[in-house]
Amino acid sequence: MKSSPSGLRQLVMGALVTSVLFAAGSFANVAQAAVNLRVYSSLTADDNSAHYIWFKRFQANIEKDPQLKNEIKLNYFPNAMLGKEADATQQVRVGAINMMISGTSIWATIAPEIGVLDLGYLFKDWNQVGKALDGKAGEALSALLLKKANIVVVGYAYNLGARNIYTKKVIEKPEDLKNLKIRVLPVPNFIATINHMGAVAIPMPGGEVYSSLQMGVIDGLEHDSATVLANKFYEIAKNASLTQHIYNPIVIAINNKSFQQIPENLRPAFLAAAREATEYERQQSSVVEENAVKQLKSLGMVFHDIDREALRNEVKPVWDAFLTKYPQMKPVVDDVAAAE
């Protein structure tokens, strides 16, 4: 039986309407799809981790923002679950990992100029760190990381205290450091700083520090108080010398393409959530450090002051060598000094 012309037109029109509705629904689904961000950290997911303090606050900010809560989904991978930090920087650079919370030092594997922040006695306190990185110095370093590492910096946070030296023997004067074997992060300017302070820098993974202290492979280590407490290094290294030689900040970075995938109208709210999390983490870092020092003292650790100005003079050659190699970082050093 043949279809009438009007019936055929109805069938065709019905098919077209169905197609249009299906297509519209598909476009709506694409428009409504949330942006999923995988966030890397090498540290534990607890309040002894500056990374987690920042992330937890950022996540809360996202969830309470009506613009963002259904549009941005965060998946946190602590404890280096996605690989070693040096490998993770490469993964963030190419977008296989979307975001990363880390010390700035590790990004020197891609942009060695960022090592300027690891120069001994570059900063006098955390306030100077904040002022510098919220100002011209931070802008220059963020531009450098975007160009060389393909990342957008959404915040510079604080570690949980300045780095001091913790040893078995009492260190009260700069000369007391002479020839002591001190564990450091395997970072060029950390190594150079400790060596110029008179000690012998021993680069070593964190997991080997406790046993190396026990066996006498090292005489001490340099780190922040919260880490010394969390890892029970105080059980062997019972003396803290307040060298305060490095204030190495944390950087929160997102792959540039991943950032561009966030709808343009949502980016200001996303950045505002990150900025508030950074401010909150900075405040919390001093609280955590104070509590860690109190606990270490109650556990028998003795804190000793030391002539930091003398040590600052000792590490000047490290600055000279670095700035000779990377003269473009001289304005950053000047901007940091101006932020005092």
Image (tube, rainbow, N blue to C red):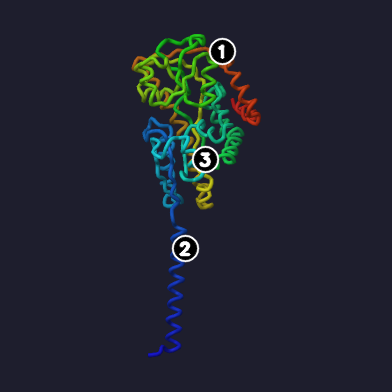
Task: Classify residue 131 as left or right of residue 3.
Answer: right
Type of amino acid at the residue the image marks with label 3: Val
Crowdedness near tag 3: few (<14), some (14–19) or many (≥20) residues, C-alpha within 10 Å: many
For image coordinates 40% across by 32% down, the residue present is 49
Residue 154, labelled with which disc?
3
Asked if the residue under mark 1 is in contact with the one under mark 3, i.e. CB atoms within 8 Å, the reply is no
Q: Is residue 314 above or below residue 46?
A: above
On the image, the x and y values in percent for residue 89 come to 49, 38
Which residue is the site of mark 2?
27
Quarter of the rendering occupied by the C terminus:
top right
Upstream in the sequence, badge 1 or badge 2?
A: 2
Q: Is residue 178 above or below residue 87?
A: above
Image quadrant in which you'd find residue 129? top right
Q: Is residue 162 above or below residue 143?
A: above
Whole-number angstrom distance, CA of label 3 to CA of label 1: 36 Å
Residue 310, labelled with which disc?
1
Image quadrant in which you'd find residue 332? top right
Whole-number angstrom distance, CA of label 1 to CA of label 2: 66 Å
